[in-house]
Image (cartoon, rainbow, N blue to C red):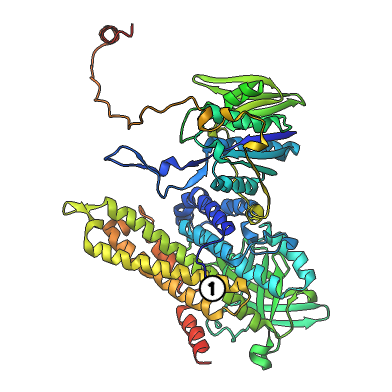
Amino acid sequence: MKIVVCIKQVPDTTEIKINPVTGTLIRDGVPSIMNPDDKGALEMALRLKDQYGAHVTVITMGPPQADLILREAFAMGADRAILLTDRRFAGADTLATSNALAGALRTMDFDIVFAGRQAIDGDTAQVGPEMAEHLGLPQVSYVVDLNVKNENTVIVKKETEDGYQMLEADTPCVLTVLASANKARYMSVSGIVNAYNREVEIWTADSIDVDESKLGLKGSPTKVQKSFAKGLKQAGEVYEVDAEEAVGIIISKLKEKFII
Amino acid sequence: MNFNLTKTQELFRQMIREFAEKEVKPLAAEIDEQERFPAETVKKMAELGIFGIPVPTQYGGAGGDNLMYSIAIEELSRACATTGVVVSAHTSLCVAPIMEHGTEEQKMKYLPKLASGEWIGAFGLTEPNAGTDAAGQQTTAVLDGEEWVLNGNKIFITNAGPAHVYIVIAMTDKSLKTKGISAFIVEAGTPGFEIGKKELKMGIRGSATAELIFNNCRIPKGNLLGKIGGGFPIAMKTLDGGRIGIAAQALGIAQAALDETVKYTKERKQFGKAIGQFQNTQFQMADLKTKVEAARLLVRSAAFKKDSGVPYSPDAAMAKLFAAETAMEVTTKAVQFHGGYGYTREYPVERMMRDAKITEIYEGTSEVQRMVIAANLYK
């Protein structure tokens, strides 16, 4: 079984403070970490390695310093690591990112591609599904558990707003995983000692067969108009009334706002 | 000259800090309160390879260095000093002497199981009448055919009970004084070897500290560690290494107390402002922070020297002396800054203050460290 896990280096948003004057993020001195959902995806892949001897490749697109999370992945048990890094990838939105990653994946042989559901710095949850679309592969998002049914089929548990779905997917497929799916393992001490003795493969735009117009800023239709801190909402009105009267109030309020 | 950790050491620090925060810290108050050995944490640490950090890979270790080991003890102790000393006593006092003085056969037999954490290690030197004056050993070992016969008692032994392998120092020829002292490897369960009374302690209360009792305990001739009569230098060299571990433990405790106090003095308001806003608080905290950083440099410098293969005995002594006294000072002031709350078990600083005290006593008191440092100065 061959697995590729797409991971991303993100600022640890729990450590980010907001400048009260400008409303912008203060990113100075904020540690960079492996995105939590991606770590959940990597753990799911490593459990398949423990169970079935799967070969696990991790890939990330980012600046050279993203090397750190690939070393971390090595220390957790990944077999191979690829860093997609090139100025031509810079400024990519989710579409350009998914084009680059899909381009890399097209050159590789795999049964399952794992990705985190979403990254904590953007929260879009788009890259995994877009990659699956580019590759023409089945996809399941919000995966919290996985079982191998046979050589060509996996059974996945997908979290939904009101419960779970159990789905079968043919391989190869793309699965996006939640951090809550598992408790990711720690790096092992011997894994850490060896992490920097191993080779991280550096891939550039020339390593993948994707038209440059689909990469980086050029390939990014998303335009940010402005960013702003979410304002505080006023406290709501509180009515202490019986159920019948409450229904009446709710309906009139919804009508007032043209919701119904 | 470079004061930065290597990338590998930095990655290790990231892992061990996260492990300590998530797995060790939540249990610190409980194991202290219940005076309970943290067996569940030991199992988790074993899985990650924490019991074999500086052990070469051919003996089943991680092949790391002593600097990484000191970082491990610092970070573990920052969360829980008991957990720090479990690893420190195991690694510095049992694994290290086997690594440094063991025969190939002894290394192959003991190191893989010790490095994997399947077996825990301990070290027995102290006796009721031989503490700082370690040369006054009364435990004896007599060769009888193919076996050594051990008789005597060791006290205040860390990891006694949970440990499977004990390095035991005993007198093989009293007439030769320190040159008549030898070191032995004794396995738990050997007939004639029992664990005695468990000590009730002020701090590091989750750590198992007990007596070792040898009553005609027969061990194979091959369990002599090093040469006959070579036990005293082995013990002294082992303690040199151990002092880096205890210095790192003290450093971790000091750092933890400093962190807690910064947090508390930012929140606690008196006379209309946070007590951290008062210059008295700030000046005292600045001094404490400076001492903690100085302790860290001494600890890392001693570990670095050990890794470089150069003599480090006075460096380890200075690191332990300074880090231990810093830990005592920082924790005592941390309790003071916390006021009445600091004296209660609702806040962790009282535990830290109790834990800090032992670092001035075990593996050589502060007075012994001064003797070592001065002896090197006037040699």
Q: Is residue B39 visible?
A: yes
Q: Secondary structure at mark 1?
A: helix
Q: Is residue B156 visible?
A: no
Q: Quadrant of residue B189?
A: bottom right
Q: Is residue A127 left or right of residue A241?
A: right
Q: Is residue B358 left or right of residue A59?
A: left
Q: Which residue is mark 1?
A: B302
The quadrant of the image that shows the C terminus of chain B is bottom right
* Residue situated in front as seen by the camera: B321 or A138: A138
Q: Where is residue A205 shown, x and y percent of the image?
A: 62, 36
Q: Where is residue B217 shown, x and y percent of the image?
A: 72, 74
Identity of the residue drawn at 28% across and 55% down: B265
Q: Is residue A245 above or below residue A151?
A: above
Disc 1 crowd, CA 10 A, few/some/many (<14, 14-19, 20+): many
Q: Residue furthest right?
A: B145
**Amino acid type of disc 1?**
Ala
Q: Where is residue B28 shown, x and y percent of the image?
A: 47, 54
Q: Is residue B60 above or below residue B96?
A: above
Q: Is residue B189 left or right of residue B298?
A: right
Q: Where is residue A138 shown, x and y percent of the image?
A: 65, 20
Identity of the residue drawn at 24% across and 25% down: A234
* Residue situated in front as seen by the camera: B297 or B25: B297
* Residue situated in front as seen by the camera: B11 or B366: B11
Number of marks in the image? 1
> To which chain does the residue with label 1 belong?
B
